[in-house]
Image (spheres, rainbow, N blue to C red):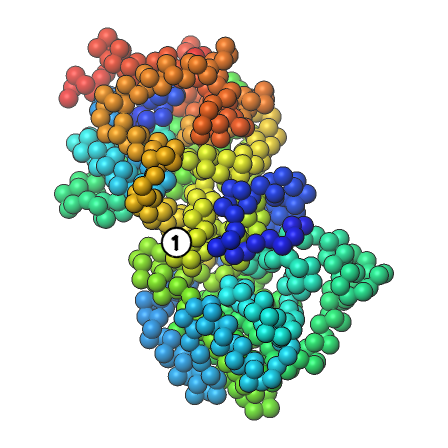
Amino acid sequence: MRASLFITCYNDTLFPETGRAVVRLLERLGVALDFLPQQTCCGQMHANTGFRGEAFSQAERFVRLYRDAETIVIPSSSCVAMIREQYAGLFEELGNNDLREDFAALLPRVYELSEFLIDRLGVEDVGACFPHRVTYHASCHGLRALHLGDRPYRLLAKVRGLRQASLPNIDRCCGFGGTFSIKNADVSSAMLASKLQDVVSTSAEYCTALDNSCLMHLGGAMHRQSLPIKTIHLAEILAATETQPVEARA
Amino acid sequence: MSTHPILDPTRALPFPQAALPVLRNPQLRKNIAHATDVIEAKRDKLVAEKTDWQQLRSAASAIRAHTLENLAFYLEQFESRCTAAGGQVHWAADAAEARQIILDLLRRENATEVIKIKTMTSAEIELNPALEAAGVAVFETDLAELILQLGDDQPSHIVAPALHVNRSQVREIFVRRMGLANLSDDPEALTAAARIWLRRKFLTVPTAIGGANFLIAETGSAVVVESEGNGRMCLTLPRTMITVAGIEKILPRFQDLEVMLQVLARSATGERMNPYTSLWTGVTPGDGPERFHVVLLDNQRSSILGRPTERQTLKCIRCAACINTCPVYRQTGGHAYGSVYPGPIGAILTPQLMRMRHAQSLPYASSLCGACYEVCPVKINIPEVLIDLRAQIVDQQREQPYRLFDPMYLGMKIANLLFARTWRFRAAQRLGRIGLRWFTANDGWIHSLPGLGAKWTQTRDLRGLPAQTFRDWWAARAPHSDQPSGKEAQ
């Protein structure tokens, strides 16, 4: 199995440990990973803020870059949602026929990490060990755009020592929303406070997700409030084993 | 309770500022969250019991889409059938014309008083102040609308307009305005007081104004769906009935109600069927109003119809399911939207009714979480429309001379340049790491940022940038790795 890793701009810059965990995890499962150094951003931030032409240029760059990739793995549900939900519309409006055809051929080969593990590799037990109490935050894009369903829970259920704590109001947004957290900072913070209450009520040691953007939002408030709970991307839990536990954050 | 909230998009504050008074009022936020949680839970339960809910949704969506694609045909059919049944159809291009038509009709009736069924369309055209200025006394007969009218307040929700008012506040309003000193805040006592107050009006006022949930083209009928029976009273006792409705309220066939009434009641109030569904066709001698007028309001709807992505906005049947599930509305309530149409549907409808000249902060009043689309019984892809409206706003901004002084605009343009070339992106990563060191505390976290970043750090910390990006780690490791690597194999 060969796969190309699209790490996403913010994981690359802010959460390299998630990328390292994906590499460790997938190579452990026998996947030959490739990383195209020309990659930058999927265009989601520009598209969702209304900068359509700019988003198009990034979307076009993505398709040109990954046209020949066998499989593309992306450890960020919102970036996958961007590609699945918005690329077609952007290419319809601003692209040419070649681009639309390339994209249509490419799209079925784009996988979010948990989809790749369960749907493509057919594994649920990835040999992980993480002896902690963990609650899973179903990010809006994972839940409603990708319909990840029980995939994350099935993966977590097979992690040795891990105890799952279910998060109340699982379908409610944490309030991040990209530039929403800046443009509507007060409303976003109120939504965040409400989500944090739910997370704290689980008494979990870790809050995990398949999207570091929600975790950056939640983790930022947890640190500000010195809460006894940490955020961690699901890839890092799945990469951890008895002999190689989670790497300490820088 | 907020006094005199401004629900006029030409004068209202931008959403982020308008939301502040509510965000700083924990009791009000609790009331709103509780009320929406209750309705949402009822809705979820009744939707879950319909095993064919997704098919019903698809059918409702298809009916509405088909109607909009053939709207001119069905409107003309409605006009001819309604006229044949003894009704009179009036066409209003905008709010001012609709108000004038209604005022002229009332003058012809020598009406000095009107009773009203709850209608958001009349709030949209700001009918009540115009009637009162012309010397016509207006009596709202829906309980929530009555509370707002007596309390000099504005609607904060399209189905439950007084959702933000609690019962002790209702008691206070009734005591003050009805002169009932001994009234308790028991809901039954409050309802009884309202019933006595309203019954006098039902029995004496000969002119009624209402809206329509649906207008049936095939038969020329109007449909009003309600819970209290006040609509039925207004349709039974008065001599004259004036219905004001947006042109999108049309349904092609009588049979379409089978689908629409099922999805509306379950989505709006979490009921299998609403208590009162009134249908009437023109006039029937000896039964109901002797004169029936329909004012069909355009007010920018036909311009919305002409835009392929935005057109779906007009599929809306005003059930408010999107409002009840919205995590933003849950925090802010309705008044922050500065319009009679709050919540996700308001965020897309209001700017379009204003031809994008006003209410430009509303398309950004969403985290794009998609909960609204998931519950919408007619499948309006609200996030898609929000993004399209944002793009229109940015396109307007592109023409403005001082656009580069807007930090968000400038930031987006620069980010696009950085993402276009790998070397630029890598340089920005390095420069960012160096620049942010100034703000990074000893614990490796950033607690305070200047400019737009301050909006983030007002409630959240940000981890300082790691010493090594993922791409640098990969580049350093790949040649030495003993793991299989796609690079060599390529």
| In this picture, residue A85 sits left or right of residue A182 | left
Looking at the image, which residue is at 76% across and 57% down?
B171
Amino acid on which disc 1 is placed? Met
Q: Residue farthest to the right?
A: B182
| In this picture, residue A125 sits left or right of residue B415 | right
Looking at the image, which residue is at 81% across and 58% down?
B184
**Residue B276 in the image: x percent, y percent?**
60, 71
Query: On the rendered image, what quadrant is the C terminus of chain B found in?
Result: top left
**Residue A216 in the image: x percent, y percent?**
46, 26
| In this picture, residue A196 sits left or right of residue B139 | left
Along the line of sight, the residue nearer the viewer: A146 or A54? A54
Residue A92 in view (yes/no): yes
From this view, report whether residue A47 is shown above or below residue A68: below
Residue A116 in view (yes/no): no
**Residue B409 in the image: x percent, y percent?**
35, 36
Chain name for mark 1? B
Looking at the image, which residue is at 51% across and 42% down?
B16
| In this picture, residue A160 sits left or right of residue B274 | left
From this view, report whether residue B228 is shown above or below residue A204: below
Q: Secondary structure at mark 1?
A: loop
Along the line of sight, the residue nearer the viewer: A35 or B127? B127
Looking at the image, which residue is at 56% across and 22% down?
A224
Badge 1 crowding class, 10 Å Cα cut-off, few under 14, some 14 to 19, many 20 or more, is: some
> Which residue is identified by label 1?
B356
Tell me the quarter of the picture where residue B269 sits.
bottom right
Along the line of sight, the residue nearer the viewer: B135 or B86? B135
Q: Residue farthest to the front?
A: B401
Q: Residue farthest to the top?
A: B480
Along the line of sight, the residue nearer the viewer: B13 or B191? B13
Q: Total label count?
A: 1
**Residue A10 in the image: x percent, y percent?**
36, 26
From this view, report whether residue B230 is shown above or below residue A97: below
